[in-house]
Amino acid sequence: MRADSMTRRLVYWASVAAGLVFAIVPLPGWVDTARPDLALLAIIYWILTSPRIAGLGYAWLAGLILDALRGLVLGQHAFAFLVVAFLAHKLQLRIRMFPLLHQAGAVALLLGLYHFIIFWTDGLTGHGYTGWDRWLPILSGALIWPLIVAAGDTMSRRSR
Amino acid sequence: MVELSHDFRPIIGRGPPLGAAFITLAILSIGLMVADHRYGQLERVRTWLATAVFPVQAVVDIPFRAWDWMGQSLADRESLRAENLELTARLRMANLQLQRFAALEDENRRLRDMRENSAGIADRVVVSSILNVDLDPYRHRVLLDKGAADEVFKGQAILDAEGIVGQVFRVNPHTAEAILISDAEHAIPVQSNRSGVRTIAVGTGDPDKLSLPFVTVEADLRAGDLLLSTGMGGVFPPGYPVAEVTKVERAATATFAKVEARPTAHLDRAREVLLVWFRPPVPDAPTAPAAAESPPATTEPGQ
């Protein structure tokens, strides 16, 4: 049991780290603007499936690492990740019960909150970008959510 | 006994209570944001974090570099020959121009010496690669593979073979973050090569477009004019090409003309750029802006 939770923890950390790397991989034009926030999606997935492993601390740390990688105001992504992780924890029992499409909608709401916080802090610090395409990652994130659930479930079934 | 929270119910699958952790971390991150943005207190933390994440950025860069390397080592003879021919032709042209340039530079230096002002000429140049790392889709920022260890300093000018690219805005131990002249938050003082009109070129967020918002309707500027850096402000070396004017629109009722220019440097394609150390021009008028970020390496010009 203990060793099992340790491997799950490692898989959790590794998947979020992979999401963070994906956040800075150069992508061509329009894919770049609609780049899904894989790190945050991984965090949400793990909070929904195993809330005892995925706490707030690592979500916050992942956000801080993203701040360091992207190099804008320190603490911005950390705060946004923290708020989303907290809400996902609070709503976890409910969201888990939703059918997949309904769940994708809930995830889109969480992503919307995340992007709103980023947009808001960007505006406060004078980096505001107001183009409509900055909200595209919400759509792409919601669309990719079923894939993430499928991948995660396959993986956890195999490890069981 | 009063219970403040209902989260202690032992339902299977529910995580631990999180209120305290949430509030602590939230206050911590807001504190970080304020300290970083408002007071700029976190240089040391930032340096430390940048060093910690540098391996990640390097790892992301590796596949792209390996692909380039493969392309170069597996290129067939024909394309190499074609490239060689083209480079030879360009070198011949460049040498031809250099012959004239050498004489001109001597003359220029003599003239400047007479005015005791030989500043503004690039003293030292270091080639740096742009790491294949995407910093932010909405901003034109790039990550260079040279940092404080290579004496890179904040406010240093970056050029490529065709013109001015941007400037360094944050120096980490092994990397440096640079802002391109096309970033919407960047502005550079320029001068028309033909008429000598001085103005400011502001980035638009489009790598192929700069905007010149402060050109009056009467100003002598037309499409095709080459804009050179003036060296005012002490950040950029004077006399390097910045952009070419593409469009001038004069409305009879407006005070300012609508002017657009295209950067001469390949901002979106450049993979290698030049970091320049130069002596900033001595301001001969008291109104000239102080060179606040004057390079520390200017006292001993290398090479």
Image (cartoon, grey):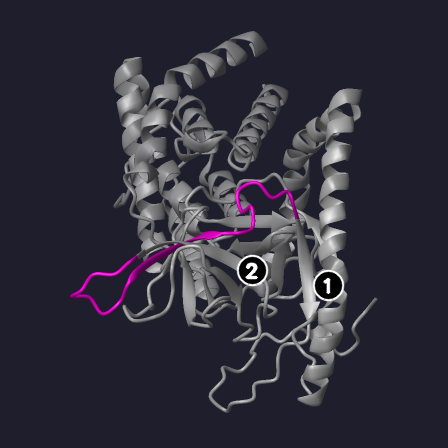
Bin the neighbour count of mark 2 within 10 Å (Cα to Cα): few under 14, some 14-19, many 20 and up. Answer: many
Left or right: A56 with respect to B264? left
Q: In which quarter of the image is residue B89?
A: top right
- Mark 2 sits on what residue? B241
Location of the C terminus of chain B (image quadrant): bottom right
Residue A52 sits above or below residue B252 on the image: above
Location of the N terminus of chain B (image quadrant): top left
As measured in the structure, the alpha-carbon distance from the residue carrying label 1 to the one carrying label 2 is 18 Å
Q: Residue B119 colored magenta?
A: no
Closer mark to the observer between disc 1 and disc 2: 1
Q: Residue at x 62, y 58 (%)?
A: B158
Residue B38 sits above or below residue B119 on the image: above
Image coordinates for residue B86, horizontal then vertical, percent: 72, 36
Q: Which residue is drawn at 41% across and 50% down?
A: B209
Name the mark on residue A154: none
Left or right: B256 with respect to B128? left
Q: Which of A36 and B243 is in front in this view?
A: B243
Task: Report the chain holding disc 1.
Answer: B
- Indicate which disc, 1 or 2, sits on the residue closer to the N terminus: 1
- Mark 1 sits on what residue? B100
Bin the neighbour count of mark 1 within 10 Å (Cα to Cα): few under 14, some 14-19, many 20 and up. Answer: few
Q: Which residue is drawn at 36% across and 26% down?
A: A140
Name the secondary structure under disc 1: helix
Residue range (magenta): B249-272
Secondary structure that dominates the magenta span: loop
Q: Can residue B253 be seen in this view?
A: yes
Left or right: B119 with respect to B184? right
Image coordinates for residue B144, horizontal then vertical, percent: 64, 50
Amino acid type of the residue tagged 1 in the rendering: Arg
Q: Residue at x 39, y 31 (%)?
A: A34
